[in-house]
Amino acid sequence: MENLVYSYTWDDAIEDGTFIRIPEELSKQLFKYPMAITSSIWSQYIEGNDINGRLWDILWMMKNGKMDGNICQFKVKLGREVVAMEAVCEARGPDNPEAIMTIYLPEEA
């Protein structure tokens, strides 16, 4: 077994601003896991708009997206633009098997 030298966890990404946590009071209406989106989605499509409305649109379209293993692919209309997104469900970290979900743009994979 290899020794772990370094890990960058989901919580680390939230702490440094790479991921933005989706409020549980919103995400728990459709999903049972903690959720986050990338800061690029936040800055390009959510910030400066109706935050809860935009997040709800993203979550709803994700709920109805196409699953391929632990990855969900979906599209959502945000303003006048249709945006392709993906979400991955994975373990929170190497020492924490709790499931978490992260939404990102396909080019961020």
Image (tube, rainbow, N blue to C red):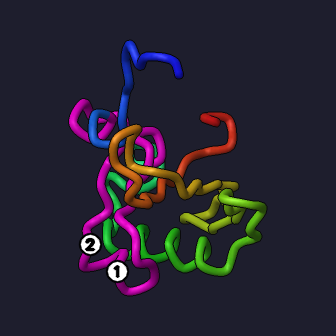
Q: What element carries label 2?
A: helix
The residue type indicated by label 1 comes to Lys
Q: Which stretch did the figure color magenta?
A: 13-41
| x and y, in percent, of residue 15 in the image | 21, 36
Spatial distance from mark 1 to mark 2, Cα to Cα?
Answer: 5 Å
From this view, report whether residue 23 is shown above or below residue 9: below
| x and y, in percent, of residue 22 in the image | 32, 62
From this view, report whether residue 9 is shown above or below residue 28: above
Q: Residue furthest bottom?
A: 29
Which residue occupies 68% across, 57% down? 71
Q: Which mark is residue 24?
A: 2
Q: Residue furthest front?
A: 1
Q: Which mark is residue 74?
A: none
Task: Determine contact: label 1, label 2, CB under 8 Å.
Answer: yes
Q: Which residue is tagged 1?
A: 28
Q: Can residue 21 be seen in this view?
A: yes
Q: Is mark 1 on a helix, strand or loop?
A: loop
| x and y, in percent, of residue 58 in the image | 52, 68
Task: Please rate how many residues cluster around mark 2, counting C-alpha atoms within 10 Å: few if below 14, some from 14 to 19, many from 20.
Answer: some
| x and y, in percent, of residue 8 in the image | 37, 27
Using the image as rendered, state which of residue 74 and residue 91 is in the foreground.
91
Quick one: quadrant of the C terminus? top right
Q: In this view, does 37 lie to the left or right of 13?
A: right
Res. 68 image quadrant: bottom right
Which residue occupies 40% across, 78% down? 32
Using the image as rendered, state which of residue 91 and residue 37 is in the foreground.
91
Which residue occupies 42% across, 58% down? 100
Res. 82 image quadrant: bottom right
Q: In this view, does 105 lie to the left or right of 7?
A: right
34 magenta-colored:
yes
Q: Residue furthest top?
A: 5
Res. 12 image quadrant: top left
